[in-house]
Image: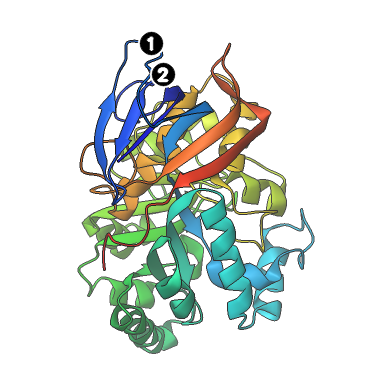
Amino acid sequence: MRYISAHYVFPVTSPPIKNGILCIDDGGFVVDVIDVKSQFEERERLEFYNGILVPGFVNAHCHLELSHLHKKIEPNCGLRNFVTAVVTQRRTDVCAAKNADHEMTKNGIVAVGDISNCADTISVKNESEILYHTFVELFGSDGNRAKELFHSGVRLQEKFIDAGLVATLTPHAVYSVSQELWKEFNKLCPSIVSMHYRERGDESSIFGGCEGWQSYEMQFLLRASKCLLVHNTFSTEADVKTNERFYFVLCPGSNLFIQNCLPDFTLFSSSRNVCIGTDSLASNTGLSVLDEIKIIQQVVPGISLDRLIGWATLNGARALGFDKLLGSFEKGKRPGVNLITGIDFDNMRLSDESAVKTLMGAFQIVAR
């Protein structure tokens, strides 16, 4: 049994506890979260740390297979040029993917929603301490190739599943999927899907927009048990309010890298379904959930640290279907334990010096 304490413990499902104590058994499961009523409590074998304790982070959006493109694409090149650079430079590099996986583990990430267009990352995910939900992504504007693309995606999904990994088929974006391919998607009974959304200023709105695509697309997305809408660079108030059952994944580091443009974070400040993603090393300087919430806090100081931690932990776990064991300090869960140092306690905010250290990992026991 380990007894771990810090200036504050963030259970996530309840307010932060001053000088709280986490009781963690030898298997990493939470046995108790003790509120000492703000008083420091001496006890045998107590580990006390300077900072705050939070559950392991959940990275709701990443492209592990693009890790070899780190520092290969110019920042602020725009979405069109970025996509072109990815298409022309992508290749197989398992070593780069493995290094990226290790970087995320070091940065306190315990679960990832990862986009895959090939099978290159299967071995990395099988050997990882991170729990992955793989989204096998399909796109194509040529309706004549819809059946071919769909069945190719099914075969790729089966490779991940046969390897013991969680995987679902997902569309890339509104603008990159033909009506014929949407028809193929509607043959599925979707569970969790993840779609790039509102990356372009001219993109049609799912909720209020163009009648021409509100049939097959919305049928599929609304039938899914969970739907993650990723990036939201140009999302509007109507997008956020119209359908609260969708999860909105914010990837500010990537938004700045590609287009030097951020979403209006105030639109999401009261939403219960906001998650954090890093996107890929092709479109970001690193894979750190902590760095992502630092950006949001800097732009919108009024969003509380407690809420930001919830976005970075439990919300992502719920979106990916991992919340039975991850995302919060609750009895019976095994969420991992992160220590965040460099806290401005007077204002209960992160500082530029804030850093994360993993005190205990969650490890891959959830779906295996």
> Are the two marked residues, 1 and 2, in contact with CB atoms closer than 8 angstroms?
yes
Q: Quadrant of residue 312?
A: top left
Q: Dot 2 lies on which element? A: loop
Residue occupying image coordinates x 58% and y 33%: 296
Q: Circle 1 sits on which residue?
A: 38
Q: Quadrant of residue 344?
A: top right
Query: Number of labelled discs?
Result: 2
- Measured as percent of width and height from the top left, residue 15 is found at 34, 20
The answer to whether residue 323 is left or right of residue 152 is left
Q: Which mark is residue 19?
A: 2
- Measured as percent of width and height from the top left, residue 212 is found at 38, 60
One can see residue 66 in this view: no
Q: Dot 1 lies on which element? A: loop
Q: Earlier in the sequence, mark 1 or mark 2?
A: 2
Quadrant occupied by the N terminus = top left
Q: Quadrant of residue 274?
A: top left
Q: Amino acid at mark 2?
A: Asn
